[in-house]
Image: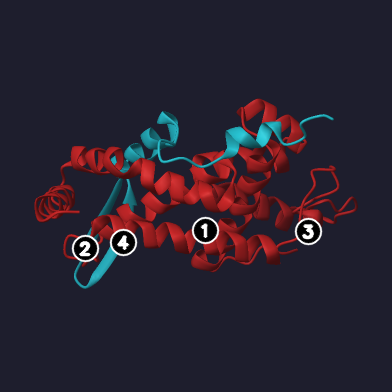
Amino acid sequence: MNRTSISTEAVLVKQYIDGDEKSLSTLINRHQHKIFSFIFSKVYDKDLAEDIFQDTFIKVIRTLKRGKYNEEGKFLPWVMRIAHNLVIDHFRKSNRMPKFEGKGDFEILDFMTDGDLNAERQIIKSQIETDLHELIKELPQDQLEVLEMRIFKEMSFKEIAFKTDVSINTALGRMRYALINLRKIIEKHQVVLTN
Amino acid sequence: MAKIYLNEASQTPSKTMKPSAKIVKSILDFSKAFTVVTYKDLQFDSFQN
């Protein structure tokens, strides 16, 4: 990359930080091929690559808007490093996390299916459900959608995949990210969900 | 013998690959909605509808 393009990058980043949203669009259009191809070359799944691409830029946006970017014009290498770290995170988590095959036997909130509740426990259960409905609103839309269909509408992953027009793997991935993020949200709010 | 790897050809990464327009739009929408509010020494993330 020559000096002119580096300075243009720096100008675009500066303009974006100063509130020019079009600069971000220019940066994405300029680098999307390299970043997306890199992610896809690691995960070999287009939907998953799109999820990681999206997470990469969400991280970029948060960092830039928080004023914590200090890469002095090296925008692309910085974004590639974020994407690389997210790919590693994905593989670490997928190795560690149990595999959900969508057989309909995965119930995240088994503790909520108690058939014999006294009045006090019913109130607690109702409070937990209310809290949960509030907390999940903080999830990204795609994850919220999958979680609601799975937990509250009790749809299978096959049905969710069909309804949201994605592969079953993506629906499973979104559910997994939804649960990971939900745990973070619960920790952030220091909420205790138990009966 | 059947070409069992036939579908893999379309999965080869290339430098012309790019995310769908829907994904790019969602990123740009997120960017428009996301703001950071600074109060004294604290920063708060904020989302606007």
The extreme front residue here reads: B1
Query: Within 10 angstroms of label 3, few (less than 14), some, or many (20 or more) residues?
Result: few
Q: Amino acid at mark 4?
A: Trp
For marks 1 and 3, give the CA distance.
42 Å
Mark earlier in primary sequence (2, 1)? 2
Output the chain of dot 3.
A
Visible residue check, residue A138: no
For marks 3 and 2, give the CA distance.
47 Å
Q: In the image, what residue occupies the spot 59% across and 38% down?
A: B11
Q: Are marks 3 and 2 on the same chain?
A: yes
Mark earlier in primary sequence (4, 3)? 4
Estimate the x, y position of residue A56 in percent, counting from the top left: 41, 53
Estimate the x, y position of residue A19 in percent, counting from the top left: 16, 46
Chain letter tied to cyan: B
With respect to residue B43, does B23 lie above or below? above
Mark 4 or 3, closer to the camera: 4
| A77 or A165, nearer to the observer | A77
Q: Amino acid at mark 3?
A: Arg
| A131 or A154, nearer to the observer | A154
